[in-house]
Image (spheres, grey):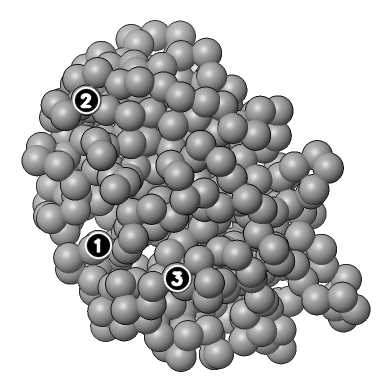
Amino acid sequence: MPLQLYLSTRKGVWIATASSDRKSWHLRGPSFLGTQCHHTVLDPRDRRTLLCASRQWHLGPTVFRSEDNGETWKEAERPPRFPKGDARERAVDHVFWLTPSNAGEPGVWYAGTSPKGLFRSDDGGRTWDPVAGFNDHPEQHNWVGSDKDQTPDGGKLHSILVDPADASRLYLAMSGGGIFESRDRGGAWKPLNLGVAMDFAPPKDDGSEYLYGHDPHCVVQHPARTDRFWQQNHCGIYRLDRPGERWERVGRNMPKDIGDVGFGIVVHPRDPDTAWVLPMDGTENWPRTAPGGRPALYVTRDGGQSWRRLDQGFPREQAWWTVKRQALCADACDPVGLYLGNTNGEVWMSDDEGDSFRCLFRHLPQVYAVTVGEPQ
């Protein structure tokens, strides 16, 4: 089947199917009309299982599963839930992030929630269990901070990454809280935030760095060069090459009048030195809009040492939208296709790696997430 986009919005899910040359697209939907859908992901291992994280008015926060390309959906038998009697009285407000494990663990998925919790499914999303090594870690309440004081609709656990070569190595990010790493499938965790600024926190009296409490917006691991990570943070754009543990703020090389604040970041599937970001205005009252009302992506092809503006096809003025952390993605075609959904309900595409853009769809609800897949 041709390439598809899975569009998760404030009021449902739509699926867009491309022609073989990606020049024309057919939009189908909605599913779950009227309900918040935060993330919809096709399993790349079987190219058949489609999961959707949805906040239903009558069912509450849950996960749905489809095996017929979104024609029909079935709710998880046991959605992500904190256990009854949880000592911290946590209750899932919404499931925010979905990640399949690597090819060596078919059927295994991870979910991140608000308030910040990590959950795992071993049966393709039918049932979910808390990852106790994270959720009940004795330091976790310090790591996550107060959900009430963070993103507008609660703190998020997101950017769950499973190392393609080693399923026991996991990474996750929290807004706020920072980035954490596990080397034993989630049993033990340590922070991975050295070098990352915390402009919203006062300097420590002893001049040392904060080990956690940061606000990463999106973290990605390069699929081919798995020791390379990119991060779009509340306080800049960063790159990390393992086994190093100190992030480099490559966003300082962005134009000063644009800055390096944004939500999403996406990498070239074959070139680890190439990444794209979409900056937003993070000054004064944090309007979270395109700087100056002129949206653009910026690309680096040298590991963040330089950045080039890409805005051909975008509005030249009075376009006051932004793109959320899950709503910027890339396919694996040659040339790479870039896709973004914005807060105005528009979906844009480039089929030439960002040299030009065109609007595929308008008038949708606010877009929360855009993911790409190639179903059977």
Classify 151 as above or below 177.
above
Q: Which element is circle 3 on?
A: loop
Q: Which element is circle 1 on?
A: loop
Q: Residue at x 71, y 84 (%)?
A: 136
Judge left or right: residue 4 versus residue 137.
Answer: left
Quarter that holds the N terminus: top left
Q: Amino acid at mark 1?
A: His
Q: Quadrant of residue 69?
A: top left
Judged by depth in the image, the label closer to the viewer, 3 or 1, is 3
Q: Which element is circle 2 on?
A: loop
Q: Is residue 91 visible?
A: yes
Q: Quadrant of residue 132?
A: bottom right
Q: Position of residue 8 (x, y in %)?
A: 53, 37
Q: CA distance from mark 3 to mark 2?
A: 29 Å
Q: Earlier in the sequence, mark 3 or mark 1?
A: 3
Nearer to us in this view, 308 or 18:
18
Q: CA distance from mark 3 to mark 1?
A: 22 Å
Which residue lies under the disc numbered 1? 222
Which residue lies under the disc numbered 2? 19
Q: Amino acid at mark 2?
A: Ser
Judge left or right: residue 161 versus residue 333.
Answer: right
Q: Position of residue 104 (x, y in %)?
A: 32, 78
Judged by depth in the image, the label closer to the viewer, 2 or 1, is 2
Nearer to us in this view, 155 or 210:
155
Nearer to us in this view, 351 or 238:
351
Q: Earlier in the sequence, mark 3 or mark 2?
A: 2
Q: Position of residue 123 (x, y in %)?
A: 53, 72
Label 1 near label 2: C-beta < 8 Å?
no
Disc sitting over residue 33 in the figure: none
Which residue lies under the disc numbered 3? 107
